[in-house]
Image (tube, rainbow, N blue to C red):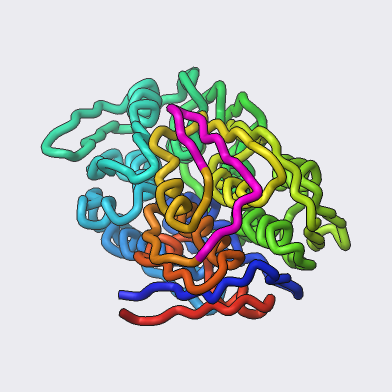
Amino acid sequence: MEKIRILGDHNLRLKGEVKISGSKNAVLPAIAASLLTQDKVRLGNIPLVKDVFSMLTLMKELGSDYDLKKNALTIQVKKILSEEASYELVRVMRASILVLGPLLARSGKAIVALPGGCAIGSRPIDLHIAGLQKLGASITLEHGYIKAEAERLQGADIQFEKKTVTGTENLVMAASLARGETVLRNCAREPEVSNLCELLVKMGAQIEGIGEEVIRIKGADELGGAVHEIIPDRIEAGTFLVAGALTQGDITLIDIQPVHLITIIEKLRYSGAVIETIKDDVLRVIGSPEIKPQDITTSPYPGFPTDMQAQFMVLMTQASGTSIITETIFDRRFSHVNELLRLGANIEVSGDKALVKGKTPLSGAEVIATDLRASASLILAGLIAGGETNVNEVEHIDRGYEAIEEKLKSLGARIERIKI
């Protein structure tokens, strides 16, 4: 086991350049999409994070061959060797549900374990199942597994009851090999969904409405290989932007897409930080000594992302006044609050709202990371907490951040990973 040790400093000023890695949430569905073809799919800008390796382990079990060199991945599924995604693999990473649609569309059968519980709340897959049933799949739930069958999926008009990122991705992939046209309504508009659709188009799919709430897909008899670049990780970028604002730092972020960060940038500017566009793919953040409080409500893209809620909560602990953070996407996504309280934060939670009172000096302590983004928030808090902070159970942060401690160290943080 490992933990991350931080020697915090109230007067820390992070400075320098940091390269943002490829998006975890974009690469996972892209890997799953390789199930739709017998040809090679080549993906660039791969983040070397735990979730990618977990997904590749699952894909190998299903029959894929792959070659990962540095940040480039070549993956090919000439023949599907197994239609089953076992619980042992799915429980490690809920995104494994993304193999359901493409596996069913190509082989006519899919057996995928139900993901089970999650530390950030319930994320039901009812919308995935309902959509696949409308495409003609016969689905049963037995012994903790989804069993889906269809000789060939048929196009349909599908209305999502609520926005779902992985649900939209699963249905777009399945519809790409369905007979006829599929219309998906109330789709998630996240950049990661658009990045997947762009890959599918390169593979031969006909898709209209990319990035919109209504997506039309004309199914193909078969798809081919493609070469595709994974977009930069907007949540990693947002985390480092907050790090700059939090420490009155001066950080330049390289290899990003600012258009994906508009809401985050607006909130940071409101808090007092200066955000400058250096080039199309380069941003600079300069923190202010006076951080303004504000109210934040998470919502689907292009609204404020739930994956940035925990990081902004840390920023608001240093604001001059009281902030209210409302979480509308996931229940039970305030698990980091109790750990922030151990560091000296003044936060009260009532239902889906957290009342954050600043400005509160933080002090180092032993804390436990409960999920991926909670891990990032605890590291951010540890940077400005006086004394030593130890973040335990860092396997969570390894799921979505590539070498975060090394990147922070290059900016001047006193941080290290140690074995325990």
Q: Position of residue 417 (x, y in %)?
A: 45, 79
Of 15 and 154, the residue lying toward us? 15
* Viewer-side residue, 416 vs 45: 416
Residue 80 picture quarter? bottom left
Can residue 217 be seen at all in this image of the molecule? yes
Q: Nearer the viewer, residue 111 or 335?
A: 335
Residue under the image location 46 percent in, 75 percent down: 5
- How far from the left and from the top, in percent, is residue 110? 26, 42
Q: In the rendered image of this protein, does residue 252 appear above or below residue 303?
A: below
Left or right: 142 with respect to 160?
A: left
Query: Residue placed farthest to the left in the image?
Result: 143
Give the residue drawn at x 43%, y 40%. Answer: 333
Quarter of the image with the N terminus in it: bottom left
227 shown above or below 163? below
Instruction: Note whether 122 is above or below 247 in the view shown.
Output: above
In the image, residue 89 lies in the stretch drawn in magenta: no
Residue 59, image x, y percentages: 34, 60
Q: Is residue 353 magenta?
A: yes
Picture residue at 35% right of the left edge, 47% below the top? 94
Magenta highlight range: 347-363
Residue 202 seen by the camera? no
Q: In front: 321, or 120?
A: 321
- Tag count: 0
Residue at 84% in and 54% down: 274
* The C terminus lies in quadrant: bottom left
Pinpoint residue 175: horizontal percent, then vertical percent.
47, 33
